[in-house]
Amino acid sequence: GSVATVTQRNPLFSTINDNDITHFKEILGEKNVVQDEERLLDANTDWMRKYKGSSKLLLQPRSNEQVSQILKYCNSRSLAVVPQGGNTGLVGGSVPVFDEVIINMGSMNNIISFDKVSGILVCEAGCILENLISFLDNQGFIMPIDLGAKGSCQIGGNVSTNAGGLHFVRYGSLHGNVLGLEAVLANGTVLDMLGTLRKDNTGYDLKHLFIGSEGSLGIITKVSILTPPKMSSVNIAFLACKDYFSCQNLLLEAKRKLGEILSAFEFLDSNSMDLVLDHLEGVRNPLPPSMHNFYVLIETTGSDESHDKEKLEAFLLRSMEGGLISDGVLAQDINQALSFWRIREGVSEAIMKAGAVYKYDLSLPVEKMYDLVEEMRIRLGHAVKVVGFGHLGDEMKMLQVLAQIEPFVYEWTSKHRGSISAEHGLGLMKANKIHYSKSPESVNLMASIKKLLDPNGILNPYKVLPQSLTA
Ligand code: FAD
């Protein structure tokens, strides 16, 4: 598998010694220098249990000053580090490959300010996404990002991976919503880019370098983010479509007819549905059993209950008459709404329970998306289950495959001008695959930027860029 792409530890990195431990204890205090084996085992292992490092040390800084002191020291000693948020990343980026020091951001979890007039939230990077969502809910606002891992992932991790998620179709990318950042560079410099302005065209917008850089250019310590107001009326429909072409046309129609109230458009195929039903307790298909090939979850969010419902119902009726949907149900209460989301959000979990997983988070032009799933089915035959699901609304899909399929998927995606990583990043899994999505000139410039910001290559080594360019 992909884990084998890295073959050797960079010999230029030092190994932790007693003096280092003493020094870290001086900076952080005894209890924030973790050597406990059980905690380390967790922190060394990724969410999918596919990647496992052998770090002997985890540090828990509580301020940007402490992050700065840690990095300055590690840089001078050539000690490699892995920044770690909630460790929910899916490309092996958040765990060490060898013995890198883990810098866990979970203790930096303070909300710094929230301005109700502008909707701008400023917080530390270790805030758990779900906590921010609850905090904002009380203020009448929402986060512009939401994803299945919200109970564990941190805003710093979301920004570092430029996570997309369920609201992408409505609120767009974090490149648009993040207004400012504070980051610490490898040499300990604290870079204050924590602006809260929506308009600021004074030179290069450096924060964008850190959004999606997966901990390879610096450690993000604070985030300022624009949050939309919470709307009072939310409606959710669970629909069935006979073929992929109908799902695609349904998306087009939804964008046209539901317009500004469309807040999620998610799809899963019947194989994904079967896995959820087989492996997750208490989940049932809200539609009567029938030969549905595809399911679509549509969410609308707006400010006028009766207007929104009317709009959605009219849309569903037209789509039913036009043959775009073959069946459908509208959630009658919050519990039913949650049960619809449980199906879609449960796909990742169900797949994990089903067996060995090969998961590819690819982005392709919408009309090409499902072709790849179908080609893979032919290629892999019946012994392997190939499932397709994802956020159709933002031209993204994930493909889960239980077999050895590289480099075919990457070549296919590249040929159709897709992206080999829609939203999860490159991490360790795809560091050597970057050329499928980026030109050699772009990759070389990225490597130069990495060298400039992190000359000793201590920040999240072996990830994002091919080792040949960074070691
Ligand atoms: P981690 O996993 O800890 O780290 C991810 C990367 O960011 C690593 O390279 C790490 O080194 C770096 N990093 C973390 N914190 C910092 C920091 N403060 N400074 C610098 N670098 C840092 N992703 C999507 O885009 N859309 C989805 O819909 C989606 N759904 C998911 C559903 C499930 C069930 C799961 C398990 C994952 C899902 N993901 C999704 C993956 C997604 O990338 C992560 O959930 C999330 O963005 C990572 O946050 P984290 O705090 O867990 O970061």
Image: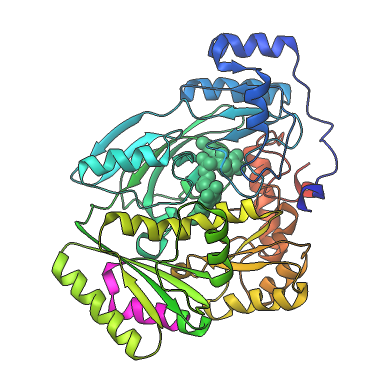
Is residue 210 in sight in this rendering? no
Q: Dominant secondary structure of the magenta stretch?
A: helix
Relative horizontal placement of residue 459, taking residue 135 as reference (left or right)? right
Q: Quadrant of residue 459?
A: top right
Tell which quarter ligand 1 is in: top right
Magenta segment includes 385 = no
Q: Which residue occupies 45% across, 51% down?
A: 147
Q: Is residue 389 above or below residue 156?
A: below
For residue 261: magenta? yes
Magenta highlight range: 248-262
Give percent across and percent down for residue 172: 40, 60
Q: Report whether 231 appears left or right of 349.
A: left
Residue 312: x %, y % from top left: 26, 74
Tell me the quarter of the picture where residue 53 sits. top right
The total number of labels drawn is 0
**Residue at 69% in and 49% down:** 447
Judge by depth and name the residue closer to the eye, 455 or 341.
Answer: 341
In depth, the one of 263 and 214 nearer the eye is 263
> Relative to residue 86, is residue 266 depicted above or below?
below
Q: Looking at the figure, which quarter contains the C terminus?
A: top right
Out of 193 and 95, give the one closest to the viewer.
Answer: 95
Residue occupying the point 49% across, 41% down:
153
